[in-house]
Image (spheres, helix red, strand yellow):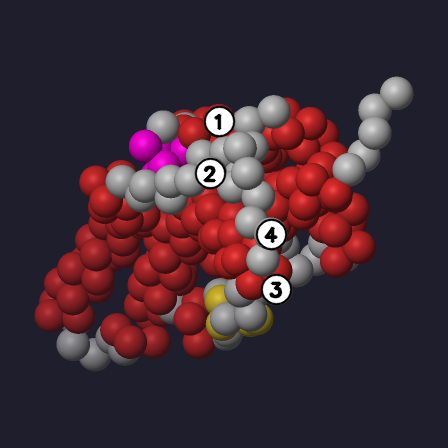
Amino acid sequence: MTVISSTHIAIFGLVLARVSGLMVSAPIFGARQIPPQSKIGLAVILSLILTPLQVSRVEALPADAVAFGFLAGREALVGLAVGFAVSLIFTGIQVGSQLIGVQIGFGFGGLIDPNSGADSSVVDSFYLVLATVIFLAANGHHAVLAALVRTFELAPVAGTSLPSINPVQVMGLVQSVVVVALRIAMPAIGALLLTDVAMGLVGKAAPQMQVMVVGAPVKIGAGLLMLAASAPTTAMLMDAVYRSAGQRAVSLLGG
């Protein structure tokens, strides 16, 4: 019969702090649409599963309450860092979709993104749904949980040494945001640029034509056609990025 001691409860609290940090910052898990009770329940269940794996690896726990609070805060920061690294991929997709929406002209009809609370266009909402579906289809949520388990191997709870953040990997994550945004936006932006050039040539050839009036629906049509044509490629790009999301997150800790 396993006896639950105060040490087990303290280790459970530290594991719960790291898992809770991930639940707050990771995509899908930290979405506003998910009820807080579900997030808390999932965090507690995951912590109960992971705590026995950490009991034998903990050397000593601080007896002081203040020191234990700092230790719990450190564990929460580790979870926040892993979740934030994965959420950067969604940020890149959001930036790319915003560039497309502005170029097409959908930026005037701003909506409120339920995830971030910021203004968004119809294109942003479309890409958000597409990114969420592909994230789940590519088992991105499994990759996030696997990355969480991997962090306990690289940086056990109550470890004497602080987890080292690899600055090279941080720069690589930031660079990946820009790359994803450009790869998503470039097909539509290129088509819209050619549309602007064509409308400019038409305006020169026929000055009596109201280019500003005619150009708006033409740009919307060209943009929507390019979005439909590039959707399969965009989906493949998102799938490839999501499958490596867990490893990218763990790489922050040198894993």
Above or below, 232 relative to 72: above
Please provide percent x and percent y for residue 173: 30, 43
Other residues around mark 2 within 10 Å, as few (<14) / some (14–19) / many (≥20): some
Residue placed at 52% from the left, 48% from the top?
75
Residue placed at 11% from the left, 70% from the top?
204
Q: Is residue 53 left or right of residue 180?
A: right
Is residue 249 highlighted in magenta? yes
Q: Amino acid at mark 1?
A: Glu
Camera-near label (1 vs 2) is 2
Query: Which residue is under mark 2?
Result: 159
Q: Is residue 178 left or right of residue 224?
A: left
Residue placed at 12% from the left, 67% from the top?
205
Please provide percent x and percent y for residue 244: 41, 28
Label 1 – label 4 distance at C-alpha: 24 Å
Camera-near label (4 vs 3) is 4
Q: Secondary structure at mark 1?
A: helix
Q: Which mark is residue 114?
A: 3
Q: Amino acid at mark 2?
A: Gly
Other residues around mark 1 within 10 Å, as few (<14) / some (14–19) / many (≥20): some
Query: Which residue is under mark 4?
Result: 63
Q: Nearer the viewer, residue 18 or 29?
A: 18
Q: Which mark is residue 153?
A: 1
Label 1 – label 2 distance at C-alpha: 11 Å
Label 1 – label 3 distance at C-alpha: 35 Å
Q: Are marks 1 and 2 in contact (CB under 8 Å)?
A: no
Label 4 – label 2 distance at C-alpha: 15 Å
Other residues around mark 3 within 10 Å, as few (<14) / some (14–19) / many (≥20): few
Camera-near label (3 vs 2) is 2
Camera-near label (1 vs 3) is 1
Q: Secondary structure at mark 2?
A: loop
Camera-near label (1 vs 4) is 4
Q: Which residues are magenta?
A: 248-254
